[in-house]
Amino acid sequence: MFSFSDNDFFARRCVWVNGPVIVGAGPSGLAVSACLKEQGVPCVILERADCIASLWQKKTYDRLKLHLPKQFCQLPKFPFPEHYPEYPTKKQFIEYLESYANHFDIKPQFNECVQSAKYDEACRLWRVKTVSANGSEVEYICQWLVVATGENAERVVPEIDGLKEFGGEVLHACEYKSGEKFKGKKVLVVGCGNSGMEVSLDLCNHDAQPSMVCRSSVHVLPREIFRKSTFELAMLLMAWLPLWLVDKILLILTWFILGNIGSYGLKRPSVGPLTLKNTQGKTPVLDIGALEKIRSGKVKVVPGIKKFNCGTVELVNGEKLEVDSVVLATGYCSNVPYWLQESEFFSKNGYPKAQFPNNWKGKSGLYAVGFTKRGLAGASADAIRIATDIGKVHKEDLKQKKQKLLAFRKLEFRQMERRVYKEKSHGLS
Ligand SMILES: Cc1cc2nc3c(=O)[nH]c(=O)nc-3n(C[C@H](O)[C@H](O)[C@H](O)COP(=O)(O)OP(=O)(O)OC[C@H]3O[C@@H](n4cnc5c(N)ncnc54)[C@H](O)[C@@H]3O)c2cc1C
Ligand SMILES: NC(=O)C1=CN([C@@H]2O[C@H](COP(=O)(O)OP(=O)(O)OC[C@H]3O[C@@H](n4cnc5c(N)ncnc54)[C@H](OP(=O)(O)O)[C@@H]3O)[C@@H](O)[C@H]2O)C=CC1
Ligand SMILES: O=C(O)C(=O)Cc1c[nH]c2ccccc12
């Protein structure tokens, strides 16, 4: 039935999966798996790391908390414990995800990195190849493929002139844990998104001297307005008002609370924060204290980088700064183009081509979860849709299988009846 070449066949083990293969055991993969369980559909999750939610467990800093209130971050069918605070800590979020996996009895295949996935037109099945930490290779064959590798699968490391000659420590925000080891050091933080802002704040709290590069523009909003989450307020307003008007209201309220951030070297984009998030996926910074450090001069905001020299950085305005270490808070990207051999549903940038809310389903049993640029809430919505969709086909398949089995049993029964009749008539004669 399968079109294996001899080499393929002997080199790797082949596994038939009776249900979907999900790539990635982050919140998105776990959510799909849980929703599938509810539909009675078995599945296999392939995860390159040795644990669930590796982004949260291995690639985030110690002081991280959820940015949005907990009701916007919980996964389907299993709420956060009631005693959790409005903004759970990273530790609490990981504990929640562990109990989520336990509750739904989800057991991913760890240490299996998906190297390639391809739809085999001949047998109308997906062929998913993995390599494990010890080098062994497995090929999974399945009817459905769910991509849950996330928007933050790989770090973005820009090429900056002279960075190789810089000489000091250079790390990406995903390797940054705490400012403890930077005490007294001059640190250049490249990027002013949520990561850049929070790393800069953390460095200040550990008596380091951060300078933060803001090469273009950024929206900074207070995390709360009138003691209510800004995100929640925005959601409420969006139910009644057009996006542009919600943006205007948010910016006016922000101006009252935070003042004119332009005077600190932080330029605001020309389009509003929610419009920018919707059109370009650029998340506004939800401020939890970095702005105060900028205002007091403890975090210095600097323009774009021209080049690095040994121990120094030269900025586009000609200024030169002495720097001990560099933290690249320059963001993340999808890794889908590296392993998924498909170009109709996914675009070259690793995101589905279609716009939200039509970006969760492709052709031939292909699905994407967690690529909406709408955080955990977006992933949960995708997961429910995907599991319902697969559940329908699976139920139909089961019905057909049952009918076929029933027809087979009837046939068997009739043959048996005939045999008994024959034997009886022989016996009589
Ligand atoms: C620092 C930070 C804070 C955030 N805070 C919030 C927040 O407060 N609220 C919110 O809504 N969103 C937040 N987000 C957005 C974030 O995208 C979600 O929180 C969430 O982690 C997305 O889940 P995911 O499962 O889609 O992706 P991930 O959590 O990235 O999980 C993907 C998994 O796929 C695995 N994987 C990748 N490639 C392969 C492969 N080839 N083979 C096998 N496995 C693979 C990875 O190892 C990983 O475990 C934050 C993001 C970051 C970086
Ligand atoms: N507590 C929380 O909930 C947190 C959530 N997050 C989320 O994680 C995701 C990723 O955030 P983050 O890691 O901040 O990444 P972002 O993609 O949001 O920000 C990247 C930053 O790096 C800058 N940058 C990129 N390349 C260069 C360069 N060559 N020179 C100078 N600057 C550069 C960008 O500038 P430009 O805009 O000019 O391209 C931008 O300011 C977001 O969705 C964010 O909301 C992150 C941290 C905490
Ligand atoms: O933190 C993130 O990456 C998110 O995507 C969360 C999020 C989704 N929509 C938003 C709008 C404003 C601020 C954060 C988010």
Image: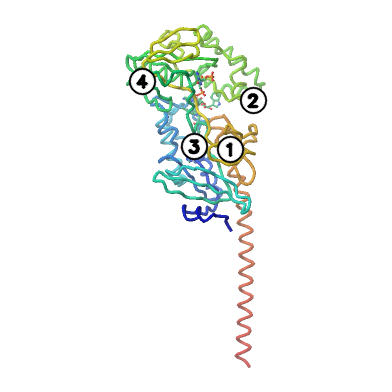
The reply to whether callout 3 and callout 4 are in contact (CB within 8 Å) is no
Q: Which numbered disc, 1 or 3, marks the residue that appears first in the sequence?
A: 3
Q: Is residue 109 left or right of residue 428?
A: left
User: At x 62% / y 92%, what residue is drawn?
Assistant: 428
Disc on the earlier residue, 3 or 4: 3
In this rendering, the label closer to the viewer, 2 or 4 = 4
Q: Which amino acid type is shown beneath numbered disc 4?
A: Gly
Marks 2/1: CA–CA distance? 20 Å
Amino acid carrying mark 1 in the image: Asp
Residue shown at 40% from the left, 22% from the top: 170
* Chain-order first, disc 3 or disc 2: 3
Cα–Cα span, label 2 and label 4: 41 Å
* Mark 2 or 1, closer to the camera: 1
Secondary structure beneath label 3: helix
Considering the image in quadrants, where does the C terminus appear? bottom right
Mark 2 in CB contact with mark 4 (< 8 angstroms):
no
Q: CA distance from mark 1 to mark 3?
A: 12 Å
Label 4, secondary structure: give it.
Answer: helix
- Say which residue label 1 marks: 382
In the rendered image, which quarter is residue 274 located in?
top right
Quarter assignment of residue 82: top left
Q: Which residue type does callout 3 highlight?
A: Pro
Local crowd at mark 2 within 10 Å, few (<14), some, or many (≥20)?
few
Residue at the far bottom in the pictured view: 429
Disc 3: which residue: 27
